[in-house]
Image (cartoon, rainbow, N blue to C red):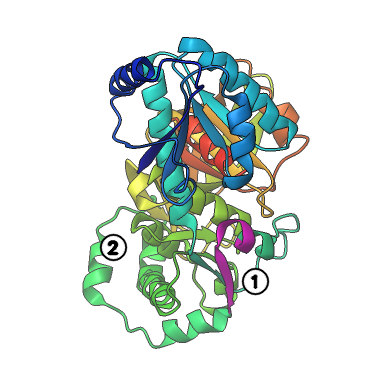
Amino acid sequence: MISIYTLTSSLHDAERIDILTQEFLDSLHIKYTFRGADFSAYGKEGLDLIYVRTGGTEGIFRQLLPTLRQDRPFFLLTSGRSNSLAASMEILAYLNQKGLRGEILHGSHEWVHDRISVLERTLIASQALHGQRLGIVGAPSDWLIASGCDREKVWEKMGIEIVDLPIERLIANFEKTAVDPDAVDSLLKVPCREGMEEKVRASLPDAERIYRALKALAEEEHLDGLTLRCFELLSTLGNTGCLALARLNAEGIVATCEGDIPAMLSMVFARAVTGQSGFQCNPSRLDPVTREMYLAHCTLPLNMARAYNFDTHFESGIGVGIHGELPTGPVTLFKLSGSLDRAFIERADLVRNTYSTNLCRTQVIIRLQEGSQSIPEYFLRKPIGNHHILLTGDHTVVLRSLMHLLDI
């Protein structure tokens, strides 16, 4: 829901201002509740826009500010008439001096309409994140030395609960999960990498059991997402979690590998704002000159793939990995820090799918945009850990809006 509040100087003709207000708001083609100068409901529900209708309103806003919610940006809407843009700039400068965030919504009617639509979408996403419950099944993998999480900050900032679940819970579920012949028969119809058919197909029954055991654990614990210490399954169950994670993600349950909490948070945030599954991947090779990046991992949400087949897991050579192909075209790389104080967002183009036996099974090559310095400046100097999330399509605007809204 969009609420529009107004700031108006008493020096202007009220009747004419009301007429111009209606003309301007009609031109935006948005659904809203007009609240005028009554700010009593500000910050309590939906997206709040402060329509600065005239100049001379700076002092009015300064007096009003102590009564307003200040934990998210102020959005100042202006038509540019009656010195309203100048007043909006003074108000925004005042907010910035006080360490508060804000944005002026001004431009063509089409641009303002689109910007408001993005802001409403990001607010809905931020509200959807509150109250989520995420699980760590097992502990983070030992090699993820820079991929911790400030759970208290995640709770205080987002209301997201992160819980620890012993991997023994998953193993117990697995042991009481019988093979489902119909489910296995369906999986047997998926092609396998040439030369690996016998090995992969022998692993499918237990890989399918891991999926159902993990899904049952998510249901038991009311999880919205999880991350799995998947390499633990190699020694305990002689199989991998790649297929389970690929299927859970396709079903809308965020599921990431290796107990990587920031990767899980990144995928949860991305799904909330885009509605998409994400590909958790390793940057395997980078070229600062061509701006190309080689990304790979052994699991991929099945609903992201335009085609896929089964393979073994790369490092162990056992179990069931996913070799998927993604659509070429625009993509977005995204990563949040575990303390929610930093994010990386970049548009790129997926230029081709590829395959090499000495890397994880799903492999894509992307090219960053002309002029991008992210490879030398970010990936080679200040990366947020290893895993990043790849999304199909350009979602940079909406992701950056969400980060701005959440002060990340």
- CA–CA distance between discs 2 and 1? 30 Å
Task: Report the residue at 58% width, 62% height from top.
Answer: 316
Of mark 2 and mark 1, the one earlier in the sequence is 1
- Magenta segment: does it hold 267? no
Q: Which residue is mark 1?
A: 139
**Left or right side of 189 for 7:** right
Would you place residue 211 above or below residue 126 in this image? below
Would you place residue 248 above or below residue 267 in this image? below
Question: Which quarter of the rendering shows the N terminus?
Answer: top left
Task: Report the residue at 41% width, 15% height from top.
Answer: 13
How packed mark 2 is, by other alpha carbons closer than 10 Å (few <14, some 14-19, many 20 or more), is some
Q: Which residue is mark 2?
A: 187
How packed mark 1 is, by other alpha carbons closer than 10 Å (few <14, some 14-19, many 20 or more), is some
Residue 135 x, y percent position in the rendering: 53, 70
| Farthest-out residue, right | 381
Answer whether residue 260 is visible to the viewer in this image: no
Which SS class for mark 1? loop
Hey, what amino acid is under mark 1? Ala
Which quarter of the picture shows residue 326?
Answer: top left
Would you place residue 254 above or below residue 83 in this image? below
Residue 312 x, y percent position in the rendering: 47, 58
Hey, what amino acid is under mark 2? Leu
Would you place residue 187 above or below residue 66 in this image? below
**Which of the labelled discs sits on residue 20, or is there none?**
none
Q: Which residues are magenta?
A: 155-165
Which SS class for mark 2? helix
Residue 95 x, y percent position in the rendering: 67, 32
**Who is closer to the viewer here, 87 or 219?**
87
Task: Report the residue at 70% width, 60% height from top.
Answer: 148
Answer whether residue 235 is visible to the viewer in this image: yes
**Who is closer to the viewer here, 320 or 124?**
124
